[in-house]
Image (cartoon, grey):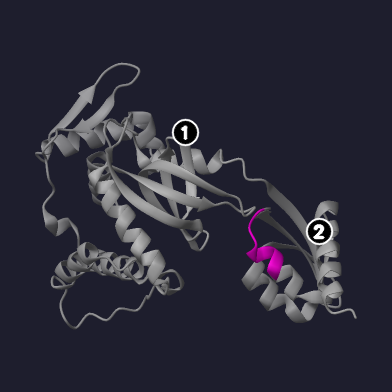
Amino acid sequence: MKTERLLSIVIHLLNHDTVSAAKLAERFEVSKRTILRDMEQISLAGIPIRSLPGVNGGYSIMEGFKLDGRVVNTEDQESIITALKGFLSAYDNKRYNEVLEKVSSILPKQQDQHIFLDFGATGENDEIQTKLKTLDKAICNKKSVQISYINALGEISSRLVEPIALNYRWYAWYLLAYCQTKQDYRIFKLVRISEFEVRGAQFTKEHGDPAALLERVFQGSGRKGLDIMLLCKAEIKVQVCEYLGGTITEIFDNGDFKMRMHSLEDERMWFAMLLSFGDKVTVIEPEELKTRLTETAENILSLYKE
């Protein structure tokens, strides 16, 4: 157990700059005194640990140090291959295909994969693949891109953006970019980018850590969320849980149940699913969603009235 913790600490330090003893103790669920002893053991093993004093101090490993590749065992390699195959089902990229081929060659041939990931819904669209490859190249080359973007309300705008990162979440691909038009960071859903052209202009500024920017922009995107309470019939329990993914809060004697879910107001899929369940699902709250469903149902009915 101790050996595994020591190796995990080394790997964690290799992937981060400077980490305090308190942060390490919290991550590995031990005391700071234990971390101090661990650092002594790691240093004695020949790994160049550097200790920095002060408020922003902590431990780090000297730049340029590399671990022996043997710390990655066969099981780890299988996990890497599974993750790469899943990623490639959504993004058919030559570079990652070559990485997959290299890692696969390391494994003994008799090993059997037993976990499979397939995000093929995003990989089926050639247009999305073209956007991914073009934007990926623009990010690597730090080239600005002119895009035409259609927001959730159907409004079209032209933007000159500096693409920073591509992100797959909520069953869709998104682009994180610095919008020169708005002078701020924005998230763009790839399927809503109708036109795009890579420009020769280089980025106007350095943008920092893409992962931190992604979370900051997604959290502060201003997209309105809805807390929804539903009353659902017992016979559609499986479908409701599968497609709406809420939390069941109460089950009645006849099998009917209440479910609470949270959704983004401007996303269409959950609203379409509610409509598809018809009279098997009743919205308890909020009132604004009841009104929206009623108006939509009336508009549909009006299409079929003589």
Magenta range: 266-272
Q: Position of residue 229 (x, y in %)?
A: 78, 58
Amino acid on which the number 1 mark rests in the picture: Asp
Helix, strand or loop under label 2: helix
Circle 1: is it few (<14), some (14-19), or many (20+) Cα within 10 Å? Answer: few
Q: Residue at x 66, y 70 (%)?
A: 241
Q: Earlier in the sequence, mark 1 or mark 2?
A: 1
User: Residue beneath label 1, please?
Assistant: 184
- In the visual, does 4 lie left or right of 65? right
Q: Residue at x 18, y 72 (%)?
A: 104
Amino acid on which the number 2 mark rests in the picture: Arg
Mark 1 vs 2: CB contact within 8 A = no
- In the visual, does 303 lie left or right of 32? right
Q: Is residue 168 visible?
A: no
Foreground: 101 or 123? 123
- In the visual, does 85 lie left or right of 45? right
User: Residue beneath label 2, please?
Assistant: 292
User: Up-down: is 304 above or below 22?
Assistant: below
Circle 2: is it few (<14), some (14-19), or many (20+) Cα within 10 Å? Answer: few
Foreground: 75 or 94? 94
Q: Residue at x 25, y 39 (%)?
A: 13
Helix, strand or loop under label 1: strand
227 falls in the magenta region: no
User: Up-down: is 217 above or below 150?
Assistant: above
Q: Which mark is residue 98?
A: none
Q: Position of residue 201 (x, y in %)?
A: 28, 38
User: Up-down: is 91 above or below 64?
Assistant: below
How many numbered markers are drawn? 2
Q: Residue at x 81, y 72 (%)?
A: 300
User: Up-down: is 113 above or below 99?
Assistant: below
Position of the C terminus, as image quadrant, is bottom right
